[in-house]
Amino acid sequence: MAKIFCIANQKGGVGKTTTAVNLAAALAMLDKRVLLVDLDPQGNATMGAGINKATLERSVYQVLLGLGDVVGTRQRSESGRFDVLPANRELAGAEVEMVELEQRETRLKHALAAVDADYDFVLVDCPPALSMLTLNGLCAAHGVVIPMQCEYYALEGLSDLVNTIKIVHANMNPELKVIGLLRVMFDPRMTLSQQVSSQLEKHFGDKVFATVIPRNVRLAEAPSYGIPGVIFDPSSRGAQAYLAFGKELADRIASL
């Protein structure tokens, strides 16, 4: 049975897509069978995995509207060695079109059920908003991984996201829980980063992953080549951190 995790944060620019793509590749390097679901109309995870969103004949848009299935839509990331349920700007229209559909919050969950036996992990890259797309991700998932920068505004957004997860847990998906908080784009030279990191550890305890992802130029360069950072430059500090995070997550799930 596949473990389904949302990579979510209502704040934009916090490294969700970078985390989703590199975590997928890191888990694949641990010989895990991985599906990356791109739920963001920008399609950045699709491109970062080496798939051209401009030439897609089918995408997650068709899957959500019942016009296609996961098996016929998924594509292989040759560079990352994982499967991708791709997205492009067409997905932006799904928000409006899904409003009148039955079971609109659980359409992704039902679609993924058909490939449950094919994967060990399904990672859902959510858009930076509490939208119908994000809600579909949360309703399909067993848990949420929250990437966040160690800065003041990130703490404010975190409380909103945790409240949202509690509401979804109570009303739509009793299996949903926070798997952990991942500190990303971390700069140890900044006092504020260290202070916020300490606050997270104090308030959330073992929910904070031990792995910390540093700011790293090579991780930022990798998407332009359509290659996950952990493959693009495995020796870089960022790649090493994501490889460590993949192992930490796999170990944490195995012990649950």
Image (tube, rainbow, N blue to C red):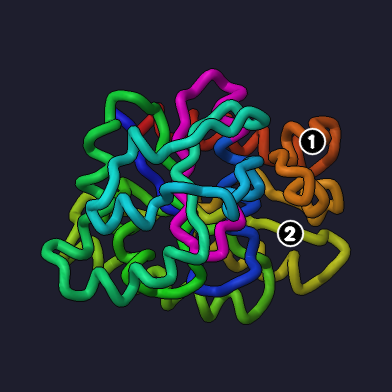
Pair 1/2: label in front: 1
Residue sitting at x 28%, y 67%? 166
Q: Earlier in the sequence, mark 1 or mark 2?
A: 2
Q: Quadrant of residue 65?
A: bottom left
Q: Residues within 10 Å of mark 2 (few under 14, many from 20)?
A: some
Q: Position of residue 42 (x, y in %)?
A: 56, 64
Callout 1: helix, strand or loop? helix
Residue sitting at x 74%, y 41%? 229
Q: Residues within 10 Å of mark 1 (few under 14, many from 20)?
A: some
Q: Which residues are magenta?
A: 25-45
Name the residue that disc number 1 marks.
232
66 magenta-colored: no
Name the residue that disc number 2 marks.
185
Amino acid type of disc 1? Phe
Q: Give the quarter of the figure containing the C terminus.
A: top left
36 magenta-colored: yes
